[in-house]
Amino acid sequence: MNYITHSFRHADVILREPQFRQQYDDLLAVLDNVTEAEIIDKHQSYGHPDIGKTPKSISKAINDLLKERFLRGQWNVESSIFQDTRYSGDTWRLDFAKDDISIEVAFNHASVIAWNLIKPVLASELNHVRKDIQTKVGVIISATSEMKQEGGFDGAIGTYEKFLDYLPPLQNILTVPLLIIGLERPATFKIRHEQYLPRKKIGRIVML
């Protein structure tokens, strides 16, 4: 996949330091090695054999491919931030974590952009609630505006550009280095929405 990045609090410089370099290289290798052909195959694999029903966007395909790769690289999946069972469930979990880096894949509603940015901070800072993981740098993987359009994503998702808009007002709250990654639109295909029920759409692969 092609992607762009934005460094907050010098995350790009810090991630190239010896302490973080191997984990950072592993992260970039995961992104670099997911091909558009694999995204197409994975997206189409969810289809119904009779009506060809596939998800509306390629977000599920990308999520599943990333999960497969990170698991293979021995990253912790759905890591709880805290040990206290009162703070469990998706709200208090990170998508992936390994040693000093925590990762959130943010293809969800724009209303939770601030929370997606804060979760890596909670994983990195000391807290009055006992921690289950302690990382030092956060990474947010998001979709660019062009990826949202060409990949069939819901119109309400928070995009890479929107994440950048949130950084200045949250400057004093986001106390740890964050790398914001924006996945760029596919070069070889796009998603075309087709109606299959009155209030349901599917995402059809259209080659360019």
Image (cartoon, rainbow, N blue to C red):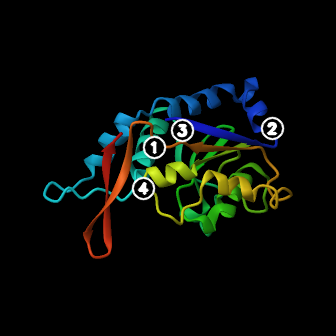
**Residue position marked by numbered label 2 in the rendering:** 10
Amino acid at dot 1: Lys
32 vs 50: above or below: above
Which of the 4 image quadrants contains residue 97?
top right
Distance between the alpha carbons at the discs numbered 1 and 4: 20 Å
Furthest residue to the right?
Answer: 172
Residue at 64 percent across and 31 percent down: it is 24
Who is closer to the viewer here, 82 or 60? 60
Q: Which comes sooner in the sequence, label 3 or label 1? A: 1
Find the distance from the CA under tag 2 to the CA under tag 1. Answer: 27 Å
CA gap, disc 4 to disc 2? 32 Å
Identify residue for label 1. 67
Counting residues from the N terminus, which is met first, the one under dot 1 or under dot 4?
Answer: 1
> Along the polypeptide, which appears first: circle 2 or circle 1?
2
* Residue 87 in sight from this viewpoint: no
Type of the residue with mark 2: His
Residue at (81% x, 38% y) in the render: 10
Distance between mark 3 and mark 4 Cα atoms: 28 Å
**Viewed as shown, does residue 38 lie left or right of 81?**
left
Closer to the camera, 200 or 31?
200
The answer to whether one can see residue 190 in this image is: yes
Instruction: Measuring from the top left, give residue 183's x and y in whole percent.
Output: 55, 43
Residue type, numbered disc 3? Trp
> Residue at image x 59%, y 55%?
159
The residue where tag 4 is placed is: 152
